[in-house]
Image: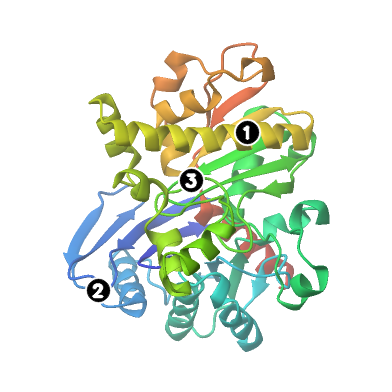
Amino acid sequence: MNSGSSSVKYQLLDMRDGARLAMGLVERIGERTSRLKHTPAGRESRERDEPIADHEAALKAVARELAADGLGLDSPELAAIGHRVVHGGRRFTEPTVIDEAVLAEIERLIPVAPLHNPANLTGIRTAHTLRPDLPQVAVFDTAFHTTMPESAARYAIDVETADAHRVRRYGFHGTSHAYVSRATAELLGRRPEDVNVIVLHLGNGASASAVRGGRCVDTSMGLTPLEGLVMGTRSGDMDPAVIFHLMRVGGMSADEIDTLLNKKSGLIGLCGDNDMREIRRRVDEGDERAALAFDIYIHRLKKYIGAYYAVLGRVDALAFTAGVGENASAVREAAVAGLEQLGLAVDSGLNAARGEGPRLISPAGARVAVAVVPTDEELEIATQTYALVAKNG
């Protein structure tokens, strides 16, 4: 289960062989018309547009779809339900069986993940009502990044203040970065512990990570998912004094600035669109505002590629993933353009070609492999969940 602020993604997997039995998406939850798309393995997808008031109603609708395929949540073969939880703070560094104490801690972290942790909690509680006998396991987005050294995780502010309020870099999209870094090593025919990878998870939310030998040593998101790359609606990096300026000179409240930086900034703030396909269409038509937004987006990407190259010292691969990373060839080409001295380049034909699985897009013999690696956060959640449940008997 991957419960977002207004969506639920799900997969039902047989972990004996990793087979996907069904998958689906419920989106626009709480809006006038919601959509459920359900795809059983080997059969046509079913889509329905109907009002779905909240996450509880969404999960019950999913249960009905699974039951119609003979894969109901009441099946005795179901071993566990794994949940993506965005923020686990410093306490949760690995998958965790959920109990009331775990729920309380996830709830306590809502202020630093206000868009995500509440939805995660609702998904957990609803799933528990549907199958109270099953282990519910939380897989935390922040867990993969807990291997960062203190030099990367700490901000340069007063230590006592930081510790009192738990202010530090936690990082997010960890399930994706873990999966993609490992899959990139497999694509190269090497062990994860022998490979250094820069992972660029580029969707509406976007983050970068530096992964040395399978362990994260730096990542772009921080205390919250606001820091780092330019995103669909989030600003990413900026001078913190902008906030004080907007308060003092602009007369804006903390809540107004929070909304500005999280929901009205990034690409949508720069050009009015947060869909990269639409932005590229406008760029091709000569739209200067869209072109500037694209250039700012790419400039930030290049800075992080260069920074993480320096952090790692040796880079074996650069991996693009998530909606933009997997599908926007123009973003991939622009991100590495001019970085040939670092061994980075893309083959224009390979980059433009569409593909389903992991693939290399760098020229033959390139010093650094450039790859497109489709992420599978739900499979990573299921893998970690099953491993924990099997270990616990």
Is residue 212 in view?
A: yes
| Along the line of sight, the residue nearer the viewer: 387 or 368 | 368
Judging by the rendered image, the residue that carries numbered circle 1 is 305
- Tell me the residue at 66%/49% (across/down): 219
Q: Tell me the element at label 3.
A: loop
Q: Tell me: residue 19, above or below residue 384.
A: above
Sequence-wise, the earlier of marks 1 and 2 is: 2
Identify the element where label 1 is drawn.
helix
Residue 392 position (above or below residue 305): below
Task: Point out residue 152 in the picture as x, y percentages from the top left corner.
Answer: 76, 51
Q: CA distance from mark 1 to mark 3?
A: 14 Å
Task: Say which residue label 2 marks.
Answer: 52
Q: Nearer the viewer, mark 1 or mark 2?
A: 1
> What's under tag 3, amino acid-wise?
Val
- Distance, label 1 to label 2, CA atoms, is 41 Å
Q: Quadrant of the C terminus?
A: bottom right
Which one is in front, 104 or 40? Answer: 104
342 shown above or below 257: above
The x and y percentages for residue 111 are: 55, 76
Mark 3 and mark 2 lie on one chain; the one further toward the N terminus is 2
Q: Residue at x 45, y 48 (%)?
A: 231
Q: CA distance from mark 3 to mark 2?
A: 31 Å
Say left or right for 392 vs 73: right
Per the rendering, the mark at residue 70 is none
Residue at (66% x, 41% y) in the render: 182
Residue 289: % across, % down: 31, 36
Number of other residues with Cα within 10 Å of mark 3, as a class: few under 14, some 14 to 19, many 20 or more: many
Residue under label 3: 230
- Tell me which corner region of the image, top left, top right, bottom left or bottom right, holds residue 307: top right
The numbered mark, 1 or 3, whose residue comes first in the sequence reads 3
Q: Secondary structure at mark 2?
A: loop
Query: Disc 1 marks which amino acid?
Result: Ile
